Amino acid sequence: MITTSLHNHSTWSDGGADIAAMAIAAKAAGLKTFGISDHWVMLPGNCHFDIEWSIHPERLDSYFQECLEVKKQVETEHFTMRIGVEVDFFPENWRENMAHLANYPFDYTIGAIHNLDGFPVDSSPDPWLALEQDAINDIWRKYWRRLQALAETRAFTIIAHFDLPKKFGFRPTVDLDSEITAALQAVRNSGAQLELNTAGWSKPCAESYPSPSLLKRALSLGIPILITADAHAPKHVNRDFDKAARLLDSLA
């Protein structure tokens, strides 16, 4: 039985319940360790901050303080709450970003890519529908290279939804094996955990992040795997954990 769930969101970003409700649901589900990891997006350059699905920079302190308050309320001898954040990676400002987050004693950071130079990878199928196949291939190529760069920083504890661009079913039609191999090797060398994110089974792609084939490659490289729910509602804090455990067993 999987008893740890670290990738979870609350109303501080794009979740549907407050931190306390998420933690209480985790305890009720029989989990032993629960982590909150709301989105943190610090855009490069002088972009105005208007991303509704992220903690606002001026409220990061309040987020952390609320996490501490809930932690005091819910922790017991048999239940631990950890405090994290899911960080969007941008090559232009990741050092500045992580330096800012270092002002808070987060237990862990999740590195993620949701945006590629202005292209929203997973917000809606509409941007993908507007692309020709060559452009889709280019997005995928850029994504793998960006993920490699993310891992090479060695700044993150966990690498999120490894093959996220497949969410709406738009796949590359060219061979990107060299890019994927480089990304996997960078993750291995970083020492970070790669999440087996169960949310993908509930998306149009109907497949875990990463796919079974990529997961098998990660395992063969000795990359540590962490099962996560990427929950945005209390009922999802351990969504499909048994299914994920069976998948891992089948690939061992």
Image (spheres, rainbow, N blue to C red):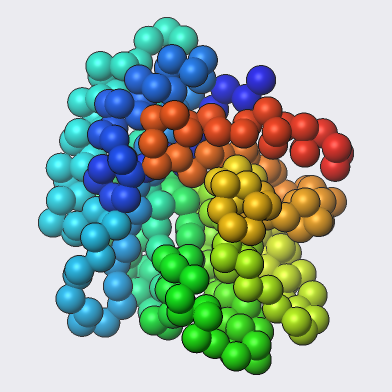
- Residue appearing at x 30%, y 26% in the figure: 21
Q: Up-down: is 61 above or below 26? A: below
| Number of dots carrying numbers | 0
Q: Position of residue 121 (x, y in %)?
A: 49, 71
Is residue 173 toward the left or the right of residue 41 in the image? Answer: right
Q: Is residue 125 visible?
A: yes
Residue located farthest toward the top when viewing the structure as drawn: 77
Residue 162 position by quadrant: bottom right
The residue shown at (17%, 76%) is 48
Q: Tell me residue 45's x, y (percent).
A: 26, 82
In the rendered image of this protein, does residue 247 appear above or below residue 149? above
Frontmost residue, 195 versus 65 = 195
Position above or below: 139 against 206: below
Image spot of residue 125 (x, y percent): 49, 71
Q: Quadrant of residue 143?
A: bottom right
Query: Which corner quadrant of the image does residue 23 belong to?
Result: top left
Q: Which residue lies at the image location 24% right of the left edge and 29% below the top edge?
A: 68
Task: Determine whether, in the image, residue 27 is placed left or right of residue 184.
Answer: left
Q: Residue at x 73, y 64 (%)?
A: 185
Q: Quadrant of the N terminus?
A: top right
Asked whether 45 or 248 is in front, the reply is 248
Of residues 10 and 187, the one nearer the viewer is 10
Q: Nearer the viewer, residue 38 or 28?
A: 28
Residue 228 horizontal/vertical position (percent): 56, 39
Instruction: Quadrant for the C terminus, please.
Output: top right
